[in-house]
Amino acid sequence: MVDFSMPAGALVTEHDRPADPAATVLGSVDVRRGAVGDIAGSSAGAILTTHPGDDSVALLNGRTLAVEAIIAVPGEPVAIATHGNRAYVSTSSWTHKDEVTVIDTVARRVLARYPLADSITALAVSPDGTRVFAGRTGDGSIAVSVIDTVAERARSIEVATGAGIGIDALAVAADGRRLHIATTDARGSAVLTVDVETGLVESAASIGAPIRDLAVADGTAYVLTSDRTRGGVVHIVELSTGRIAGIVELGGAPTQLAMGADKSRVYVVDYDQVLVVCTLSLRVVNTIVVDGRPSCVSVNAQSGRCYVADYDGRVTAFGVDTTAPLTYSEFVASNALVSDIRDLEPVTA
């Protein structure tokens, strides 16, 4: 994705290039279940949205946007991750533990529930669908529950402790052997790399500002941060070294980041728009403007559609350019920042 052969501290400009073609509105629907917390697509092309105010998950036809099913879940659904015909939803309730709920997207019903300790603040599924990772934030500690979807059992990886520490996002490596954990505490933020089998933290890349979201592709992490000082920033991190190889200054107050299937674009949700960033040039190549305030985004590279959900409960489909761009002879890279790895407090029994 990013050219890491650039010398540290180099600033190279690229020739002006045309932006992606403007996104075209293909359709919009009011799901009528309240604000959308998260959105994801299934392998069959369906779109699923979580509705915390309604304790439900909606299943939409990805082509027509028709609402085909409303599935009740045990609590307020927040995050959702999919693989094949399964959807995994984190739910929260005042009356019982946070859970990961498993939904069959074909039968359109709940198959299983996994109660977990602490608050589930992030969710991810392995590329082969055999493991679901639930990031848990406790009182001064963070952990990850690993759900074996074949054996239907869960184990816990205790990650770190610290004042005000929490898990912001999770991303699984392509081989499924490593889990990347975005975490923020009172001292700053970092991306931790954990060996899934041993449960050991292998490395930590220091970021700084509070992390909002995370995506990983080909050994590179795209880390979205946002604070009052700089607004939104995408940090491009070389995971093998922990080096920040580039940054994209966005401004605003973005809250979510999603990567297209071909890894050539990342989509960043801001207050009233979705910014499209090219992962080769590290430039904003498109801006998708929506009527409502967007909450989350999902991209289907096969259909060339970007689905944007908002806090009014509406889902809008846009036609976007999801093809990989040409390879450039020159790349953009901001001044490389080599940050010290921050020490994590050991977990005590």
Image: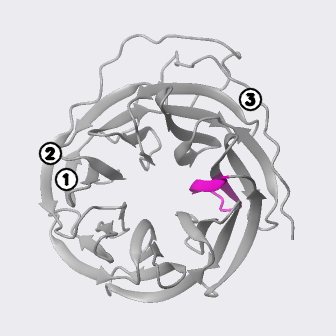
In the visual, does 201 lie left or right of 294?
right
Which numbered disc, 1 or 3, marks the residue that appears first in the sequence? 1
Of the 4 image quadrants, the one containing the N terminus is top right
Residue 290 is at least partly visible in this image = yes
Viewer-proximal residue among 302 and 138: 138
Residue 53 figure quarter: bottom left
Identity, as a three-letter code, of the amino acid under mark 2: Val
- Marks 2 & 1, CB-CB < 8 Å contact: yes
Tell me residue 43's x, y (percent). Answer: 38, 68
Q: Is residue 38 above or below residue 148?
A: above
Q: Magenta residues, as a range? A: 164-181
Viewer-proximal residue among 170 and 312: 312
In the visual, does 347 lie left or right of 127?
right
Which residue corresponds to the image point at 76% horizontal and 36% vertical from the top-left?
241
Task: Give the label on residue 25, or none.
Answer: 2
Residue at numbered disc 1: 316
Which numbered disc, 2 or 3, marks the residue that appears first in the sequence? 2
